[in-house]
Image (tube, rainbow, N blue to C red):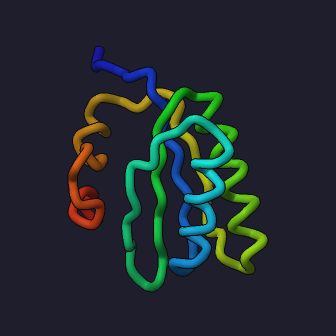
């Protein structure tokens, strides 16, 4: 059986940079989470990633999604993975890594 980490991953995908920044700001203010990075997906879509304990990530993603919706029609998706599989870890940004090069997309 493969290794599973206890640190949760929170993701918010937005239409445009302004809702992404708003979501990132709200997430980091709402709970004790670490902003891992952002990824320009293409077509104007931006994904913001946070890590932390499951409860904190859950609260952060909810706050980020709410903030993103207040900006307009910017929220595309919000999702949490409570225990990230070790093989998924290999495609996530590492500390000090340039976010745009961190995820293959």
Find residue 24 and report its horizontal and vertical position in percent: 55, 59
Q: Quadrant of residue 12?
A: bottom right
Quadrant of the snapshot with the N terminus: top left
Q: Which residue lies most toward the bottom here?
A: 43
Q: Which residue lies most toward the top here?
A: 1
Q: Is residue 18 above or below residue 99?
A: below
On the rendered structure, is 4 left or right of 79?
Answer: left
Q: Which residue lies most toward the front here?
A: 29
Q: Image point 58% across, 28% down: which residue? A: 54
How many numbered badges does the structure rendering display?
A: 0
Quadrant of the snapshot with the C terminus: bottom left
On the rendered structure, is 83 left or right of 41?
Answer: right
On the rendered structure, is 95 left or right of 14?
Answer: left
On the rendered structure, is 26 left or right of 100?
Answer: right
Q: Is residue 24 above or below residue 72?
A: above
Find residue 9 and report its horizontal and vertical position in percent: 48, 40
Q: Image point 48% across, 46% down: which residue? A: 50
Q: Image point 54% across, 27% down: which residue? A: 53
Find residue 37 and report its horizontal and vertical position in percent: 38, 56
Q: Is residue 77 above or below residue 54?
A: below
Q: Is residue 101 above or below residue 95?
A: below
Nearest the viewer among 100 and 96 is 96
Q: Image point 25% across, 44% down: which residue? A: 94
């Amino acid at each position: 059986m493969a290794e599973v980490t206890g640190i949760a991953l929170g993701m918010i995908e937005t239409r445009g940079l302004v809702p992404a920044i708003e979501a990132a700001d709200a997430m980091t203010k709402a709970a004790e989470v670490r902003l891992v990075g952002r990824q320009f997906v293409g077509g104007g879509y931006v994904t913001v990633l946070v890590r932390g304990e499951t409860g904190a990530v859950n609260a952060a993603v909810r706050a980020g999604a709410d903030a993103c919706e207040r900006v307009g029609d910017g929220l595309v998706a919000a999702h949490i993975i409570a225990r990230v599989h070790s093989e998924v870890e290999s495609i996530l940004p590492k500390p000090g890594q340039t976010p745009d090069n961190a995820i293959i997309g």
